[in-house]
Image (cartoon, rainbow, N blue to C red):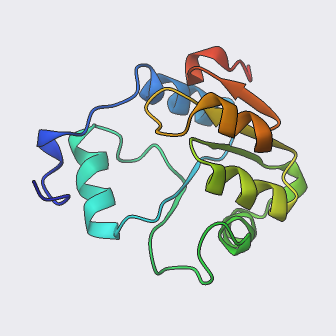
Amino acid sequence: MSRADPSDSSFPIKGIQTFLSRLREYGFYTALATNDERKDTEAILSHLAMDGLFDIILCAGEVNPPKPHPETIFTICQKLSVHPHEAVMVGDSVTDMMMGKRAGVALTIGILEGGVTPKEKLEKVADLVVDSTRDLKFF
């Protein structure tokens, strides 16, 4: 199976579209930082009906050095005119949490649902670990 054909294996985390839509309704910016290629990322987002839910998307090769270096967060924050200490990093990997910590974000949140990182590993690096985005209440 090719990553360019997301229909075989990609499925949304339950409630993620609603979560992202509500964040944006309440004035939060949303960004996606991925080590996947842009064409694959856009295909997956389209397949999952998630296009338009992110203010910024940064993909593999668009920022150097890559995760876990904080440059990706610095670039996102600069484009959105937000200071990193006002940002929250939500992710499913140790690399995501390390990037957030190194950038000095206000909070790093590890998500277990849909991820591949065991809870024990995320708890060592994240400020907070939750089962799902449905457990997060920003509004």
Task: Provide residue 13's location: percent of width, then percent of height.
Answer: 40, 27
Q: Residue at x 53, y 33 (%)?
A: 20
Q: Is residue 122 left or right of residue 112?
A: right
Q: Is residue 69 left or right of residue 91?
A: right
Q: Is residue 45 left or right of residue 72?
A: left
Give the answer, above or below, for where 106 lies relative to 25.
below
User: Foreground residue, 29 or 39?
Assistant: 39
Q: Quadrant of residue 133?
A: top right
Q: Residue at x 58, y 47 (%)?
A: 93
Q: Is residue 125 left or right of residue 50?
A: right
Q: Quadrant of residue 127?
A: top right
Q: Quadrant of residue 4?
A: bottom left
Q: Residue at x 60, y 36 (%)?
A: 24
Task: Provide residue 40's location: percent of width, then percent of height.
Answer: 26, 62
Quadrant (top left/top right/bottom left/bottom right) for the C terminus:
top right
Task: Provide residue 112's location: percent of width, then percent of height.
Answer: 55, 28
Task: Provide residue 58's location: percent of width, then percent of height.
Answer: 51, 67
